[in-house]
Amino acid sequence: MTKTQSAANPESVKLSRYDVADHLRSPEEMADYLDAWLDEFPNDVSGIARAVGDIARAKGMTQVAKEAGLSRESLYRSLSEEGNPSFSTILKVLSAVGLKLSVSVARSDG
């Protein structure tokens, strides 16, 4: 083991930031990811928008923007943590990545 690889030297460990978009490779994975957000955090509007943004980045923001008929800059802004995309934008992005929304009956607790 070299000095830079030494477990005794934690300063030498290089970490990279985890980006879920790097792991969303298929439409099925993208759909499962968004379904998980909608199931776990149904009232987290900004989180759901960020999840849609993750999916768009996985597909390629330039390509998604073109297919959705939006500018790449406005798409990044809309789907950022501070963004507030319109429902129309969400639907256009989902269509551009090959996904669609569906509705089911909400679970009741009683």
Image (cartoon, rainbow, N blue to C red):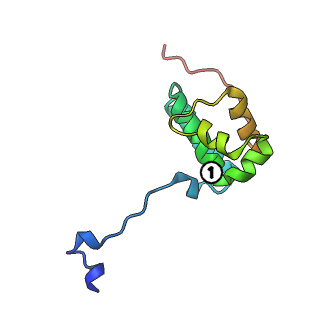
- The answer to whether residue 34 of the structure is visible from this angle is no
Which quadrant of the view contains residue 50? top right
Of residue 101 and residue 54, the one placed in the foreground of this image is: 54
Residue 81 pos. (x, y %)? 51, 37
- Amino acid type shown at disc 1: Arg
Left or right placement of residue 91 versus residue 40 in this view: right
Quadrant of the image for the N terminus? Answer: bottom left
Of residue 106 and residue 46, the one placed in the foreground of this image is: 46
Would you call the spot at circle 1 few (<14 residues within 10 Å), some (14-19), or many (20 or more)?
Answer: many
Which quadrant of the view contains residue 25? bottom right
Left or right placement of residue 38 versus residue 16 in this view: right
Query: Seen from this angle, which residue lies furthest left?
Result: 8
Residue 63 pos. (x, y %)? 74, 52
Vertical position of residue 76 compared to residue 91: above or below: below
Vertical position of residue 2 compared to residue 74: above or below: below
- Dot 1 corresponds to which residue? 57
Residue at 63% over, 31% down: 85
Q: Secondary structure at mark 1?
A: helix
Residue 82 pos. (x, y %)? 51, 34
